[in-house]
Amino acid sequence: MDKLSELLKEAKPLYRQRKTRKTIAKLVLGLTMPVFLMTSICQTYLQGNDIYLSLDRNVLQYELMDDEYGLLGLHN
């Protein structure tokens, strides 16, 4: 029984250390994952806006081109 109690006394600080490390790891992961997800969502949103604006500019360029002789093939 004495050996068992000695082993428990040795294991208790190690158990607490392990539990503390797990808690810290969960906390860090819980705080950093939303930041990474929001960053990627914002970047995707901004890239989508850039693509939309570039497509919109292309449409405006086609509208501004004067195709009197039908060379561009835009009008069938």
Image (cartoon, helix red, strand yellow):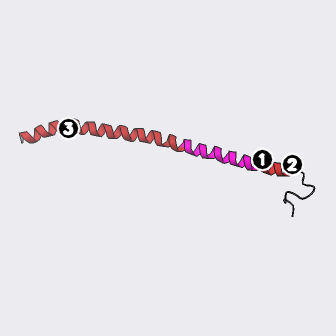
Task: Tell me if 11 is positioned left or right of 18 in this view.
Answer: left
Kindly identify which residue carries mark 2. Answer: 64
Dot 1: few (<14), some (14–19), or many (≥20) neighbours within 10 Å?
few
Kindly identify which residue carries mark 1. Answer: 57
Q: SS for tag 1?
A: helix
In the image, residue 51 above or below residue 16: below
Residue 54 place in picture, x, y as percent:
73, 47
Q: SS for tag 3?
A: helix
Kindly identify which residue carries mark 3. Answer: 12
* Residue type, label 1: Arg
Residue 63 place in picture, x, y as percent:
85, 51
CA–CA distance between discs 3 and 1? 68 Å
Mark sitting earlier along the chain (2/1): 1
Q: Residue at x 41, y 38 (%)?
A: 28
Q: Quadrant of residue 12?
A: top left
Dot 3: few (<14), some (14–19), or many (≥20) neighbours within 10 Å?
few
In the image, residue 14 above or below residue 51: above
| Of residues 72 and 57, the one drawn nearer to the viewer in this rendering | 72
Q: Residue at x 50, y 42 (%)?
A: 34
